[in-house]
Image: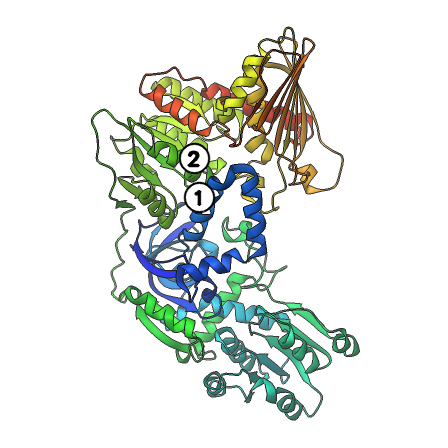
Amino acid sequence: MKQVLVKGGSVCIEEVPAPAVEPGTALVRVAASLISSGTESGFLSEGGTAGYMLKKASDPLNIEKVKRKLATVGIKGTLEIVRDKLLEYQAPGYSTAGVIVDTGPDLPFFRVGDRVACSGVGYACHAEYNVVPHQLLTPIPEKVSFDEAAFVSLGAIASQGVRRAQPGFGETFLVSGLGLVGQLTAQILRAAGCHVIGCDPVAARRELAASLGAEAVCTPDELEGVTREQTAGYGADGVLVCAAAKDSAITNQALDLCRQKGRVVVVGAVGMHLERTALYANELDFMLSCSYGPGRYDRQYEERGLDYPIGYVRWTQGRNRSEFLRMVDTGRVRVKPLISVAEPVELAEKAYAAVLQGGATLAALLRYGDLSAESTPAVPEHVLTLRGKATKTGETGVAVIGTGAIATRFHLPTLADLSGCRLVAVANRSGRKARQWGQRFEAAYCTTDYHDILKDPGVDAVIIATRHHLHKEMALAAIAAGKHVFVEKPLALSVPDCDEICDAAERQGVLLTVGFNRRFAPLALATKAAAEKMPGPKTLLYRCNAGTLPQDHWALDPVEGGGRIRGEAVHFFDFARWMLEDNPVSIRAERVNADHPAYENDSLTTLLRFAGGSLAVIVYSGAGSGLLAKERLEIFGGGASLVLDDFKTLKHYGVPGKDVSVRRVDKGLGALLRHFIAAVRGQETLSVTGQDGRWATYIAEEALHKAGGVQEE
């Protein structure tokens, strides 16, 4: 399928595999998508790739990220990461309309053939096909065209801004900024029975607003006098700021133009260094409006379909979208006059060029063919053939499922350099990512449905590098297909799930390994060799300064990530077992008694007592400073000590061996994968098995239980 992508600040149209449906989603054949002149211009750069790179390089946040990467992966590794980030494909678009051609399981309210409007960044992209969760779908009224319905997201943004202002019949409102959202806002206010003053420096936008019902329009310089005239000197009942500006002049002007106890709602992206005088003297209400409305940025609502009860939240983003389309249907809001440009998707670059010019250009539509015929479009293929490397006799065919950081920075580059091995396919739910990384590492094909890989007899082994909740389903499917399986940690999120995977692999006679790469780190191997010279039981202290994560990060989600103890601390539980070559017979754990998410969800101290008498203390904390190195291992026993500091230095105290210091951190990711492929080829015996994954998950579950993280049954 064709998709509009942005790479290095420039627009391109690429062929990518069409997305596959998932539970609670619909596959939509797009008829029209809307380019917003405000939001989407941020994706682009008038200077092309060079201008885009300069813009990114000047961002203070990006500068800090580069500094941290330099400290951990060195200059070469940092340059590779920066290059990938700067030149990765981005998928613009967040407002489309089309026809449902396929549905996933558990999709309520919709069926194949329904005309729908679609919303959401990452879902309603400029592409021929999109997979959209049901809460981001809105039925299109019969008389509303696809072109009109494609305005649904912008209409919801305008609607939510108006709702925040709580306009009353007969009140006078000022709309500052008559871009696309401002034009819609002005019309919605008129439909609510308000008098509307529109302000914009562009004459064509003022004329358009006047033709659509604004009672007065003016330039910013004229605004004070016009407002005084239209309100008999009292000031506006409210101001909706729909403009975009880095400084705060527009915002403070809005405060000055309100009557006593008026209200100001900021819808656009403007500076908000507020001057106190007008706010205080007139006791104004100052508010922000969040995008489409309640439910926006809430994954439980948008992705998992949990609606807010209407008795508690009358106007959610979904209900805002529906009401906006109803206003279009009844003619109270007109969107066709707002269309400045309409082009077929093949000419997307031309449409974006018009958007970048600004001025009178408000909205540009992309069209994807006529869908007015009664027959429903066919479901597309999910596979895209790429120009892969030539096949050699005797090679092991490998496929990678998931294109996150571990897969793209380590697994795919390792496979590309590994003799006797061929990358057959790359799978990702995002077609653009599947194509980008499949093409980069010369896969034979890419796909958005991993089942295509499992049907391929040319694939001998699969690497599963997806979010944690998908590991069980994908591992079991791969094993059933007779593939050898490498699963990134954790093996699964519960011990019963680990047991099911291990049992299936044993029955099928395939190899199963888990991504416990630290066992293969050169300094870890040197530490283990030195520790074997220390007589008697040992005490291990492994400290992981994991750093904080945003509270909405998927790794903290109990469903998708399972939390950081199940998701990452399993590394260190496994490392202790491997280092001591023993299994724990007692597991104890405690949390810090503090009412803070970094302690409640991210931090745990675990004490393991092993059968041979050794102890291991694993301190995993998400509450530390990012300036401190991430990992440190100390081993004590037999009058000697070892210290492994962040896989950079190894120091010996009272035990034979030479201290080691390295410039490049190697945590064994490449060595583990090379070992797995060698085992698949019958050249080595697999040293990390599914049972190791089970043990690590078992320790995590027990530790969480002992620390109060699991409810008693």
Asked if residue 491 lies left or right of residue 638, the reply is left
Q: Give neighbour class at mark 1: few <14, some 14-19, many 20+ (Cα, 10 Å).
A: few
Name above or below for residue 300 compared with residue 631.
Answer: below
Would you place residue 186 above or below residue 303 in this image?
A: below
The residue that mark 1 highlights is 80
On screen, residue 408 versus residue 310, left or right, reads left
Residue 713 shows in the view: no
Query: Residue 380 or 48: which is nearer the viewer?
Result: 48
- Identify the mark nearer the N-term, 1 or 2: 1
Q: Residue 631: give its label.
A: none
Q: In the rendered image of this protein, does residue 590 appear above or below residue 7?
A: above
Tell me which corner region of the image, top left, top right, bottom left or bottom right, holds residue 513. top left
The kind of residue on which mark 2 rests is Phe
Cα gap from disc 1 to disc 2, whole angstroms: 12 Å
Q: Position of residue 146 (x, y in %)?
A: 35, 68
Q: Is residue 157 left or right of residue 13?
A: right
| Residue 475 picture quarter | top left
Residue 222 is situated, as x and y percent measured from the top left of the image, at 60, 89
Dot 2 falls on a residue whose secondary structure is helix
SS for tag 1? helix
Q: Which residue sits at x=58%, y=43%?
A: 68
Where residue 117 sits, quadrant-wise, is bottom left
- The quarter of the image holding the N terminus is bottom left
User: Depth check: 422 or 499 in front?
Assistant: 422
Q: Position of residue 304 (x, y in %)?
A: 50, 48
* Residue where numbered disc 2 is placed: 410
